[in-house]
Each structure stands twice: as structure tokens, then as C-alpha cells.
Amino acid sequence: MRRGRAVSTDILDMGTFRYSIQRTSPQGVEETLSVCQILVRKLNALGANWLDPVIGEVVVDCELFDRDQAKVCLFIQVTRVISDEQLWSELNKTG
């Protein structure tokens, strides 16, 4: 196991299993904030009225506050998609 990465599989009842991949994020705060800004632009284009995102506290990546009601808050946690085609192909085959 490399530092900051973990893979585990649990065999469950009737031949099923649970698969988990964990790793630290290689991206920094700037990229996370950029993703949140894209989300805000889309939400506002759909009729919402959010202010620019701010970096969140320990638990969340970003926080949004409603422009009209500053107390309304939306918490955002950015996750990254695993782009390993071989992994998805194998999971598709084996269930």
C-alpha cells in the first residue's frame, strides 16, 4: 500500500462483495474552489441566487450563501471520479 492509499474488498453473503478505494487527493484547494465556482454558475443559470463559494470548514470543501438570504447555506463536498477503465470493466463483468 502506498502512503495515503488503501484498497479493500469484503466478501458478503451469497457471493457478493463490497469494494472500496481510498486515497488522498492530489489536487489543491484552488482546483476544488474552481469546481465549486462552476457549480455555482450552473445553479445560478438555473434560477438560484448563490454568492461566490468560499472555502469550507474542516468537514466540507466549499460553502455557498444565498445572495438574498445570507443565512441560507449549501455545503459542497467535491469528489473525484476514478478514471481507471480496467477497474470499471472488471466490475462490470464480475458485478
Image: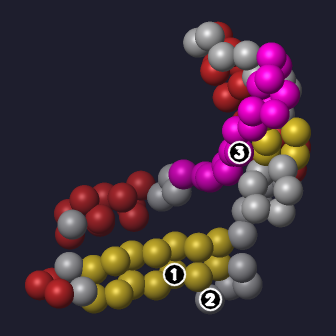
Q: Residue at (62%, 52%) from the top-left corner? A: 79
Local crowd size for mark 1, using a 10 Å CA cut-off: few (<14), some (14–19), many (≥20): few
| Residue on which the image places disc 3 | 75
Q: Residue at (76%, 62%) from the top-left corner? A: 59
Quadrant of the rendering where the C terminus is positioned: bottom left
Mark 1: which secondary structure?
A: strand
What is the x, y in percent for residue 47?
A: 62, 10
| Residue on which the image places disc 1 | 7
N-term mark: 3 or 2: 2
Determine whether, in the image, residue 3 is placed left or right of residue 9: right
Q: Say which mark, if any, is on residue 38.
A: none
Q: Say which mark, if any, is on residue 1.
A: 2
Callout 3–callout 2 Cβ contact below 8 Å: no
Q: Nearer the viewer, mark 1 or mark 2?
A: 1
Q: Which residues are magenta?
A: 65-81
What is the x, y in percent for residue 52?
A: 85, 26
Determine whether, in the image, residue 9 is placed left or right of residue 53: left
N-term mark: 1 or 3: 1
Q: Amino acid at mark 1?
A: Val
